[in-house]
Image (cartoon, rainbow, N blue to C red):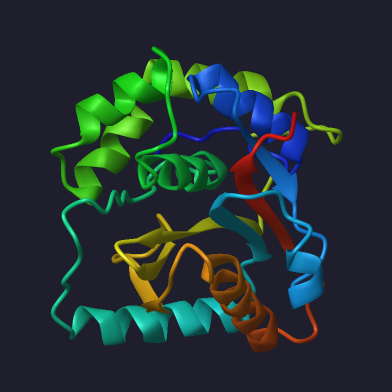
């Protein structure tokens, strides 16, 4: 398994990263300072994705195993437009969450670059094949490694990472949790463009409620840049 240097949950660094990959400058990452309705109103609109960074605690891993067992027993029915990929590269969860965020929003423009090339190559692949393709993609790997060194804390590819990025997106009126460590996309009910942020905040609160003693949660949003 390839090992990348972990990305820091720094919206400035992650914004520079998506622009390096070829995402148009009209889009940016921003911190979500609170999950209460009045705080969510401060997020610039439109919001295309909510990205959650959380600790992989014992409680979370237990929940993930139980959830996977339940999903494996159910028929999986997802729209063809849903872009989902597995994560096989260690410490690549930040990149996978950003790819999930961009690839599931067709109105996010991309210039020629590493991400556009990867998505064109991966569009007809299975989630597992996409994960393998990312592992071998020199353009994305190089961009990730370069930006991972630009965080405010020293990054070390050998360091054990206990935190994990996932993306929450609206695809066809369904709120999806997209996590490359999971075998399947996870549905969290219906949503709309108007209610998406509130609905995604509810899912983030569920993560926090499962781990009430844990404080190390970070929430960001992929939004329109403010001029």
Dividing the image into 4 quarters, which one contains the N terminus? top left
At 47% from the left and 47% from the top, the residue drawn is 101
Which of the two residues, 46 or 105, is positioned nearer the viewer here? 46
Seen in the image, is 54 located left or right of residue 91?
right
Which of the two residues, 32 or 10, is positioned nearer the viewer here? 32
Q: Is residue 216 visible?
A: no
At 64% from the left and 87% from the top, the residue drawn is 210
**Residue 68 x %, y %:** 33, 78
Which of the two residues, 218 or 2, is positioned nearer the viewer here? 218
Examine the image and state in which quarter residue 74 appears.
Answer: bottom left
Q: Is residue 152 above or below residue 212?
A: above
Examine the image and state in which quarter residue 50 appears.
Answer: bottom right
At 31% from the left and 49% from the top, the residue drawn is 85
Seen in the image, is 30 located left or right of residue 23?
right
**Residue 47 x %, y %:** 58, 52
At 49% from the left and 43% from the top, the residue drawn is 90
**Residue 184 x %, y %:** 29, 66
């Amino acid at each position: 398994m390839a090992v990348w240097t972990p990305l820091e949950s720094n919206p400035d660094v992650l914004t520079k990263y998506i622009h390096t990959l070829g995402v148009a400058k009209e889009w940016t990452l921003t911190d979500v300072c609170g999950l209460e309705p009045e705080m969510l109103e401060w997020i610039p609109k439109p919001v295309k994705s909510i990205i959650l960074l959380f600790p992989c605690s014992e409680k979370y891993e237990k929940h993930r195993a139980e959830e996977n067992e339940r999903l494996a027993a159910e028929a999986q029915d997802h729209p063809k437009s849903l872009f989902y990929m597995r994560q096989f590269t260690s410490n690549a969860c930040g990149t996978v969450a950003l790819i999930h965020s961009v690839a599931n929003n067709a109105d996010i423009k991309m210039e020629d670059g590493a991400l556009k090339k990867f998505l064109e190559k991966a569009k007809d692949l299975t989630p597992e094949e996409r994960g393998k393709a990312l592992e071998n993609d020199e353009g994305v790997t190089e961009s990730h490694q370069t930006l991972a060194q630009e965080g405010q804390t020293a990054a070390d590819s050998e360091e054990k990472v206990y935190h994990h990025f996932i993306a929450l997106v609206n695809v066809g009126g369904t709120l999806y949790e997209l996590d490359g460590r999971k075998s399947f996309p996870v549905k969290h009910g219906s949503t709309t463009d108007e209610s998406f942020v509130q609905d995604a905040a509810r899912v983030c609160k569920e993560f926090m409620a499962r781990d009430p003693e844990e404080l190390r949660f970070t929430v960001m949003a992929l939004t329109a840049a403010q001029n």
